Image: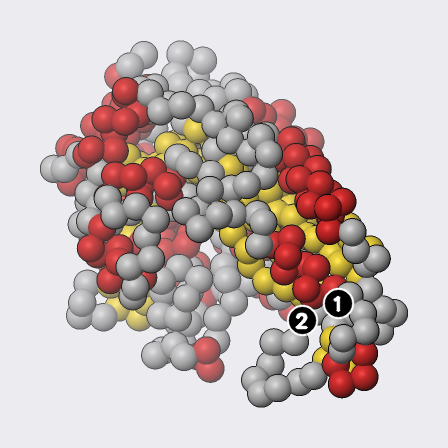
Amino acid sequence: MSNEMINFLSTLISYPSISSNPNNSQDSKNLANFIIDSYTNLGFKMELIDNLIEGKNPLIFGKFGDDPNKKTIMFYSHYDVQPASIQDGWDTEPFDLIEKSDGYVYARGASDDKGPITATYFAMKELLETTSDIPVNIAILYEGEEESSSHGFEQTVYKNKSFFSDIDGILILDTSWFTDHRPSLDYGLRGLTYMAINVSGPNKDQHSGLVGGTIREPMSDLISILSKLIDSDGNVQVDGFYDDVLPLSDAENELYDKIDFNINDYVSYLGRNSLFQQNSKTTLMNMWRNPSLSIHGIQGAFSGSGSKTVVPASVTGKVSMRLVPNQDPKTISEIFIAYVNKIVENMNTPNSISVEPIGLGEWWYGDVNNFLFESAKSAIENYWGKEPNYVRSGGSIPIIPFMEKTFNAPAIGLPVGQSSDGAHSQNERLRIENLVGAKHVIINLLNKISNLN
Ligand SMILES: [Zn+2]
């Protein structure tokens, strides 16, 4: 079976479905049609759904079974990939899958998300071949723009949601195991508020030998603002920032004791011990359940090598905050603006300063005690013989809370690959054991859910 799975994955890989490159949009469409044909051959009802944003890749909707006595489980993945070319430093052609003797297959999209799509497809195929039925009703929802901010996803799904009947649970197959040797289940993600602070001075760039010492420079004003956003212990200084953060419950606190996470490995990954807390548990909490603020860059600033004596006329600082329950991304953007305005008032500067949000994303906080999580945990334990890591990741996937609301059903993240797979990087890979294991876990999980009825 694993050869058949690898062949199928290799075919998915061969379509360079790079969503950020418009030249690949026909490849993406061809791949979407291949996936649709494959599921149609299994007896699924499939539809290619045009993206409501013109020129963006279509979505794939599918379903199997409409027995009202069964639960309906939705599978989400994306069929688009990050760009890749051998010139980027790949050892082999990124769109030709190769199997190496280390037990991994290598190709762009192997782990993110063509492997997960393959595992799902073969789980369905095997169920139909061995029992000529699937024990629950299935809904398939795949998109082709995930690597490009999920363009058009929310409006297109919302408009076409009547394709699906009632959904009971959503499986997100688009994350990875937290550590290499223990499976994970994901129950949370942080949200995001991304802000731009612009400071504008003279009407064009100036020479420091000419104007230096005569004007209040935009860059100095911006640095002064940026320096007041966070203190040296990592505390965000924005007034009211922590007001809505949910306190830690005893049950949540206990979950952190069981995670297999070693602070020394993390420090060696970083290459320097610059941690705020020298403790595994509190570091994990800082990564997953506490909010944070990062300063990413200054647009318009000189950033080349050597010395250039420019005085930039206008600079924009880019700052983002990762948010947790119950912080509201929009409220955070408003209090951030109010805080910067307060700093600016005290600066008494002639430069013009504006602050605006350039990206908002909601956090997601699932329930580790619902039927979906419990069934997945037991399916994983059955196959892998280990309890999964319960992961609440520090990143953001805003479509998950959107799907929970739109389909009024809980979601969980069921990762297929490992975090060391190099998704988005050179020589992306997937362990064959993980690919085959994911198929078994899905079959197991659907059988368990059907027994709950
Ligand atoms: Zn992905």
Task: Judge from the rendering whether residue 52 lies leftward or rightward of residue 228; answer left or right.
Answer: right
Distance Cα–Cα, label 1 vs label 2: 12 Å
Q: Nearer the viewer, mark 1 or mark 2?
A: 1
Tags 1 and 2 touching, CB below 8 Å: no
Residue 301 numbered mark, or none: 2
Q: Is residue 389 visible?
A: no
**Relative to 225, residue 444 above or below:** above
Name the residue: 77% across, 82% down: 207
Regarding mark 2 in the picture, which secondary structure is present there? loop
Q: In the image, is 390 to the left or to the right of 312?
A: left
260, 67: nearer the viewer: 260
Q: What residue is at 65 percent from the left and 53 percent from the top?
A: 225
Q: How many marks?
A: 2
The residue under label 2 is which amino acid type?
A: Ala
Residue type for callout 1: Glu
- Reading the image, the residue beneath label 1 is 217
Hey, which residue is sitting farthest right in the picture? 203
Badge 1 element: loop
Give percent across and percent down for residue 341. 73, 43
